[in-house]
Amino acid sequence: MMNRKWIHIILILLVGRFGFSQSSVVDTKHNLSVSGPGEIKASTEEQVCIFCHASHNANPQVPLWNRYDLSTTFTLYGSPTMETQTMQPDVESRLCLSCHDGTVAVGLVRTRDQEISFPLGLERIPLDHRTNLTTDLSDDHPLNLDMTNHPTEELACTGCHDTHNPETPTSDRLRCSSCHNPHDNTFGDFLVTTSSQGELCALCHAKEGWNASVHNTSLATWNGAEPDPWPYSEMTSVADNACQNCHESHGNGSTYWLQKASSEEDNCLICHNANVAQTDISAALMKPSIHPVMDYQDVHTPNEDPAMMQRHVECTDCHNPHQIVDTSAEPPQTSGVLAGVSGIDQSGAFVEEAQYEYAVCYKCHETDDLNTHHYVPRLEIQTSIRLEFAPGNPSYHPVAAVGQNPDVQSLIAPLTPSSQIYCTDCHNNDEFMNIGSPSGPHGSSFAPILSAQMLFVDGNPESSTIYALCYQCHDRTIILDPPGYSRKNPHRRHLRDEEVSCTTCHDPHGVYNNTHLINFNENYVEPNSDGLLAFIDGGYRTGTCYLLCHGEDHRAGMGTY
């Protein structure tokens, strides 16, 4: 019987001949002999190397391989953003898969007339075992990629090496040994280097903006509440897990981009539920009015064309997880949470990296097919939110440009008529001021994802609550009783005396043919007895309405406001 001392001596000799790792395979799970430390090991076989190597009658593949050629046709990985062709695994990778595809007996070797005996159920790697990759590699890192002329710098190989001869670079092809050294388990999972802080992935992947991103730098840790965001990792922080926060190289839940979970949003929400991240986005997505990310799967792609794409919303439509940083900005500039996200600019052109927050919103809401107008049926309908905010309009909220009206007394400091605002000043989580509650248009108690309450119907006593959205920026006292106003204040008359909603007269995004955001709600406003339905701006704080509203006939000669 060969004792462990002689096994170590033979392994040392093999190191000198074939460039094997100097760490002993004897102490790893790849020691499949009866003395092995793993759960899969032979019933009586004492030789360690025989499961892979043979001194004589070996497979003509380096180095002295003791396994049969594998002729399996594998199902391959693919994604909409791949820029190089995936091919069937090459010879070297097939030698590894002759155990790890789960179809071939571990004890089936060339130099034995009969299979080496294993305990019942362990003759092959069990189907539910993490290392059984099966013949379906669509959820595994692609193999046999041609790396010689890759068209982008995002996959910039620094040089992979043949495990058995580290002095010989083999960076032309990606294979199992590019990431794994089967004889050395120093870094766990037989990796060639540590996966901590994305070090292993960074050998080949150089994602733009990754080094500064929060997913690469955050020291946040898991608070222990289920579910475990890192079930197969011994690393404890977001920065340490890095790429493994969202991706697994083998056996993923998703076949797109090696995501850990089959639903894209679950990759985000397993941390963004206040168990790792400070705020609970999952709770915001349970509110009555939401961006329904749960309703879509395998639709979004990073290279999609907004003009051609199927309408959808996913977390990654608004957030680039490889570039997101914790920085603020002033309107209309994008803050760090939107870094590296594509959009549609004010001219209607696609931009790969939006510089303004509104451009990210326009990506889906540039043409809205009346969806945003079902709250209030308007006299004048504009289906493009981008065109509602167009700087050439007579009136608009100052999202894409400074507003047209230099005389807005009611603005609450620090807002002035020369200020610009974000879409998310109005469309936001209604609890965004609360500790632990996220900001952003994930969800709100008030539709359509409003940061505060806004009633769209008439017949309610005016209060600071029901029109809280408007009163976030406009001083309620001045709205109801503006200083120096010689005539009866139309806001007081309509809001308080007649219980008319703000939205009955005003269209908050913008109006292409009227000043002061006047665009009447047709549920309440009709043509007058002369057949007229219009607002005529009379200049400085004056104007005339021609309409029938709540039984009152506004006709010519009835005066101005």
Image (spheres, rainbow, N blue to C red):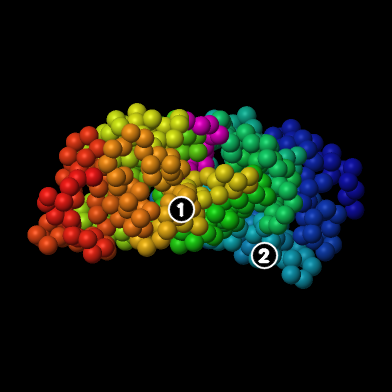
**Tag 2, which secondary structure?**
loop
Please, what is the dominant secondary structure of the magenta stretch?
loop
Give the residues drawn in magenta, as a range. Answer: 318-329
**Quick one: which residue is furthest to the bottom in this view?**
120
Label number found at residue 463? 1
Is 454 on the left-hand or right-hand side of 539?
right
Label located before the other in sequence (2 or 1): 2
- Read off the residue under disc 2: 128
Q: Mark 2: give few (<14), some (14-19) or many (20+) Cα within 10 Å.
A: few
| C-alpha separation, residue under disc 2 versus residue under disc 1 | 61 Å
Front-most of residues 312 and 400: 400
Amino acid type of the residue that numbered disc 1 sits on in the rendered structure: Ser
- Which residue is located at x 58 percent, y 36 percent? 214
Tag in front: 2 or 1: 1
- The residue carrying pointer 1 sits among few (fewer than 14), some (14 to 19) or many (20 or more) residues within 10 Å by Cα, namely few
Are dots 2 and 1 in contact, CB under 8 Å?
no
